[in-house]
Amino acid sequence: MTRLLSLAAVAMFAAPLCAADPPKPTPILGIGTVSADQKFVFLPAKEGGIEAVDLATGKPVWTNKDAAKLAGGSDKVVVAWTADAKKPNTFHVVAVDAATGKTLNKSDAVELPDWATTAKTHGRTFRTAARVDEETVVVMWQAGAFYSGGARPTPEIEAAARKNESGTVKVNLRTGKVVSTKDKPKDDDFKVGPAGGGGNKVGTYEFQMTEELPSFKPGAAMVTKVTFTVTQDKKEVWKRELAGNPWNPPPP
């Protein structure tokens, strides 16, 4: 009996070590994530898509053009999303191999309310976050709208323009099939991805991001200039220009 009890005790204490969750990526500055092993940082690439950059040197490791914005991930999978070119209220989830940058799968369409849009534009908001659970990606989304006219609105007009909706879907990593759930995400749920904000420090590295507004050029797209800088011991290690954001100033 003593031997049996000893074996049971060993098994009881060993189980939590085997079942420990793997390390997870760390969101930073609302724009990217640092890999679980802190070797790479995943960012929106200047020329489009997402990229993995060596955290120590600033050298690009891979670029994936199938996705545009980061949403979260695990130690093995980077989860991003891309807008639907024909439907502004629709997006697709893209799962990317964290080591190689190869696309593992692109999901079926995830549809938002008719009034919503995934584009960054004045009067509309949109954000996502994602976590990986074995062969399933759980994606949280939130869309909003507010009055964006030039003249000061009446309280009734402002209230009518204000909308907010959110939801959760599950995406099968093998098939890309999307299943909606009844779960409504909370603010804390978005902390697993860049949309939740994230800090500006991982290990001995610190991160800064600057965004410059574009000058007006008739006929030219107005896009901000985004610069990402990595420092260590208060010394610049490297910097890199990232994908800019469309700039839509509010009407006068």
Image: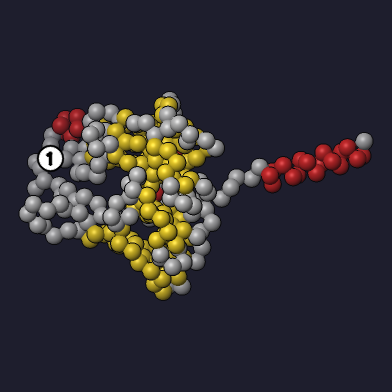
The residue beneath circle 1 is 149
* Residue shown at 29% from the left, 51% from the top: 48
Residue 107 appears in the picture as rendered: yes
Please name the residue shown 42% across and 38% down the image.
105
User: Relative to the observer, which residue lies in front, 154 or 47?
Assistant: 47
Q: Is residue 224 left or right of residue 135?
A: left
Left or right of 224, for residue 179: right
Q: Position of residue 40 (x, y in %)?
A: 46, 58
Q: Identify the image quadrant of the N terminus.
A: top right
Vertical arrangement, residue 96 with respect to residue 61, above or below: above
With 76 as the anchor, is 145 left or right in this view? left
Task: Determine which quarter of the picture holds residue 206.
Answer: bottom left
| Percent x, y of residue 67 | 35, 45
Mark 1 element type: loop
Q: Is residue 144 visible?
A: no
- Up the image or down, 28 lies above or below 116; here it is below
Please name the residue shown 30% across and 62% down the image: 241
Q: Amino acid at mark 1?
A: Gly
